[in-house]
Amino acid sequence: MAATNHDQIFSHDKVFSRRGLRAIAYWIFTMPVVFENAAGFVWGVLHIEYLRVMLVHLGYPPYFANILGPWQLGCAAALIAPRFPLVKEWAYAGAFFNYSSAIVSHVSVGDGPDKWTASLVFAMYTVCSWGLRPPARRLARPRSAGASAWLWIVPAFTLVILLIVALFTLPKPPEF
């Protein structure tokens, strides 16, 4: 007898349900991101030569690894731990900022795709992991307050005013 539930793809086995395949895909994309962030922490703590040379090449000070490393450990822990959906949102944002910044850094110093492709792949894995999260790892959707244009006009206008003020209040270079 053929399966009538269209959530089933190959059989009645839950592993092959759409939900089961989605969970497998989620972990396939999540584990490399978790590993890369955990490895980044270890590299920073150990001050490995590869990281030191890469930071200098990209124009970052060596102590940048001391700043980035603990955040990478926090990201890895947040993504792999159960619950805490708000912390996971921040971890996903941080991972994406890290990878996209690495791409921009490499391109800015003239590096070719051989240097920034890995960061692009990890950025895409991060987005895929975020999009495939199971419901227990997502934030609850906020109730819709209406789609009034005023909800966007006032903040946009305020931001434009603040940008203009920032232009007129540029600081002078410090004297050391």
Image (spheres, rainbow, N blue to C red):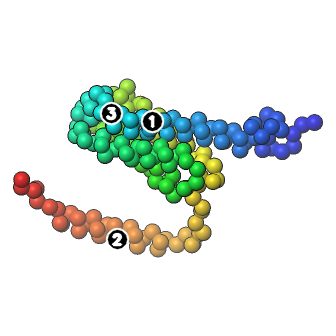
Query: Residue 55: x percent and y percent?
Result: 27, 35
Judged left or right of residue 147, residue 164 is: left
Let me know if residue 120 appears in the view: no
- The residue drawn where x is 78% and y is 44% is 7
Disc 3 designates what residue? 46
Nearer to the camera, 167 or 59: 59
| Residue 158, label in figure | 2
Residue visible at 57% across and 72% down? 145
- In the image, what residue occupies the spot 66% across and 42% down? 22
Which residue sits furthest front?
Answer: 46
User: In front here: 144 or 32?
Assistant: 32
- In whole angstroms, how far apart are the C-alphas of marks 2 and 1? 39 Å
**Residue at mark 3 to residue at mark 1: CA–CA distance:** 15 Å
Label 1 sits on a secondary structure element that is helix
Q: Residue at x 40, y 70 (%)?
A: 155
Q: Earlier in the sequence, mark 3 or mark 1?
A: 1
Q: Is residue 122 left or right of residue 15?
A: left
How many angstroms separate mark 2 from mark 3 (CA)? 45 Å
**Neighbour tally class for label 1: few under 14, some 14-19, many 20 plus, Cα within 10 Å:** some
What amino acid type should be assigned to the residue bearing mark 1? Glu
Which residue ends up furthest to the right in the rendered image?
A: 1
Callout 3: SS: helix
From this view, report whether residue 94 is shown above or below residue 60: below
Pointer 1 residue: 36
- Mark 3 residue crowding within 10 angstroms, few (<14) / some (14–19) / many (20+): few
Measured as percent of width and height from the top left, residue 106 is found at 31, 34
Quarter assignment of residue 51: top left
Task: Specify the amino acid type for callout 3.
Answer: Leu
Q: Is residue 162 visible?
A: yes
Residue type at mark 2 is Thr
Which x, y percent locates residue 39? 42, 34
